[in-house]
Image (cartoon, rainbow, N blue to C red):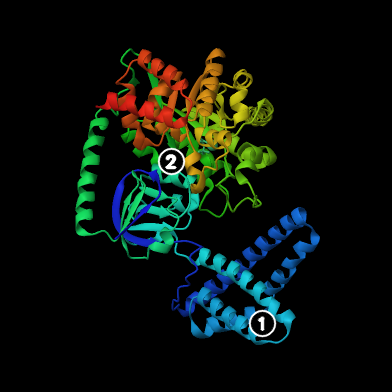
Amino acid sequence: MITLKGIAAAPGINIAPAYKFGKEDLEIPKEQIRQEEIPVQIQLFEEALISTRREIIELQKRISTEMGQEEAQIFDAHLLVLEDRMLIEEVISRLKKDQINVAFIFSEVLKKYIEVFAKIEDEYLRERIADLNDVGKRILRNLLGKEHKSLKDLKERVVVVAHDLAPSDTAAMHKQMVCAFVADIGGKTSHTAIMAKSLEIPAVVGTGEATVKIKTGDILIVDGTMGMVIVNPDEETLRNYQEEERKLKGVAERFLQVKDLPAVTLDGKEVEISANIELPDEIPSIKIHGAHGIGLYRTEFFYMNRKDAPTEEEQFQAYKTVAEELSPYPVIIRTLDLGGDKFLSQFEMPKEIQPFLGWRAIRFCLARPDVFKMQLRAILRASSFGKLKLMYPMISGVEELRQANAILEECKNELRQTRVPFDENIKVGVMIEVPSAAMTADLLAREADFFSIGTNDLIQYALAVDRTNEKVAYLYEPAHPAVLRMIKNIVDSAHANKIWVGMCGEMASDEIFTLILLGLGIDEMSMPSLAIPQIKYIIRSVTMAEARTIVEEAMSLSTAKAVEHFLQEKLKAILK
Ligand code: PEP
Ligand code: MG
C-alpha cells in the first residue's frame, strides 16, 4: 500500500481499479487487428503523419522568429523523415501482413531503422538517429492519442490515471464508468478540475508521479476532498474509508435540508445562488441541488469533442433549451472563452508559449468576428425564450467592451432587418478577471449592465500564478490581501454605478469565503452545483452585520494565511 498526496480538485471519495490513459504513456500496446480494420489503421497512420508535419512546421516557424532561420533549419531533416517512402511503405506492408495495430508496427520499424543507422560508419547518417527518434516519438504520440480508446468507450467502472488531462478529455468522461480521476500535473482551478466538479467525479491532480507509481488494475482509493490517493489499500484502510464515506454523507444531509430555500441572512438580505455549467446535460443536477439560475454557462465545452464547430442553428437550439428549462430564473451565457487551457481542433489556434496571456477569450472572438457573430446571433435569438443575459470573458479595459458591443449591435441590426425576435433589453455583462479590469471597474461599470467576478483567472493574473501548475499551487491564494482588495474595489465600483455584481469563480463555492463575500456585498454567487446546499446553509446562519464585521477584521490582516485562519475559525463557530 502506498499513499500519494496531491491537490484536492473535486470532492468525494471513490474506490475502483486504475485505468491508465493518455498520450504521454508511450507503452505501446500490441493488439491483433482484423482484416477489415486495416484501412482504418492506415488512415490513422496518415493522419498521424499529417498532424506531426503540422506540429513540426509550427515549431519551425516559432523557432525561426525567436532564434533565427538557421536554428529552424534543423527541422527540415525532421520533415524529410516524414516523407521517407521506404519507411512509410514498410509500415503499411507489415501492417497488411502481420495484422497488428499500426502504433506497434511503426515502433518496430522505427527501432529497426535506428539499429541499422547506429551500425553505419558515416557520421552524417549516425546523426540522423536523433532526428528519427524525435520524429518517431512525435508520430507515436499522435498515433496513440488517436488510437487510444476514448474515455467515452469504457466498459467498467475505473479510476482514470493520466499524466495530464485536457478539459475535453474530462468532458468526455461518463460518470457511470469514470468514478474518479488522478493526474500527475494540474491545479485546483484548471478547467479539467472544474469539469470534474461539475460532473461530480472526485479528482486529485498534481500528484507528480501517479503514472509512475500506479499500474492499470491497481485498486485505488481516491479522496478528492483531502487530495489523497491510496494505492492497493489494506483491509483496515478500506474499512476506514467506507466509514468516512458514510460520515460525509451524514454531513451533506444537514445542508441538503435547506437546498430549496432562498439564501437569505438572518436579518433578511438575500443573495442569489446560481450554478456554473459546462454542458446543458447538467441542468437536472443543478435543479436538484437548489440552483436559482445559471451564473456561468461555459459555452466553449459545446464545441469540444466534435469534428466541426456547432452551427448557429445548433447553438440556438441549445441556448433556447437552457433558457426554457431554467425560466423564470436567469441564465448568464458566457461567450466563447477559448485558449488558455482550452483548445479546439476546429480552429487553427497556434501553440503559444504563454497561452493564458495570449490569444484567448474575447481576444480570439474580436479577431474572428465570423465565429463570434455566429454565437452572438444564436444567443440573441434564444433570448426570446427565457431570461438570458450574456457576458464577455477576459475583458481588459473599456475599449474591448466597446468593440464587442459594436459587434453585438451589428448582430442585433441583422436580426431586426430580418424580423427575427430577440430580447431588446438583454443585459450585457463583463467578467472581471483581469487585474486591469478590476482596477478600472469604475470605468467599466458605466458601460456594462453587470459584472461577474472570475476569480480563477483574476487570482492567477493578480498573483502571477499559473492556475494549472501544481508546482506553484501553494501561491494560488484567494485570501491574499491583493485579491480581497480587488474584489472590494470591484463590488464598490459596481454598486456606486448601481449595477449588479456576481462572482462565478471557484472562490464563490469555497465555504471559507462565504462570510467575507457576503459582507463585501456580492449580489450573486455562482458555483458548481454540489456546493450550493452548504453555501446556502452558511448564508442562512448569519446576519449582514456579523458578515460586515468579519470583512473589516479580515481586511486588516497582512497575509493570506492569517485571513484563512481567521475565516476558518469564524466558520467553525457558525457550523458547530
Ligand atoms: C474564472 O476565471 O474565474 C471563470 C469563472 O472563468 P473560467 O474558469 O472559465 O476561466
Ligand atoms: Mg476565466
The amino acid type of the residue labelled 2 equals Pro
Residue shown at 62% from the left, 63% from the top:
51
* Relative side of 384 to 366, left or right: left
Give the secondary structure at mark 2: helix
Q: Nearer the viewer, mark 2 or mark 1?
A: 1
Mark 1 crowd level (few <14, some 14–19, many ≥20, 10 Å Cα): few
Decide if ligand 1 comes within 8 Å of the CB at mark 2: no
Give the secondary structure at mark 1: helix
Ligand 2 lies in which image quarter?
A: top right
- State the image coordinates of residue 467 (x, y, percent, origin top left): 52, 42
Residue shown at 39% from the left, 43% from the top:
197
Mark count: 2
Which residue is disc 2 drawn over?
280
Which residue is disc 1 drawn over?
86
The outermost residue toward the right is: 69
Q: Do we see residue 152 in this rendering?
A: no
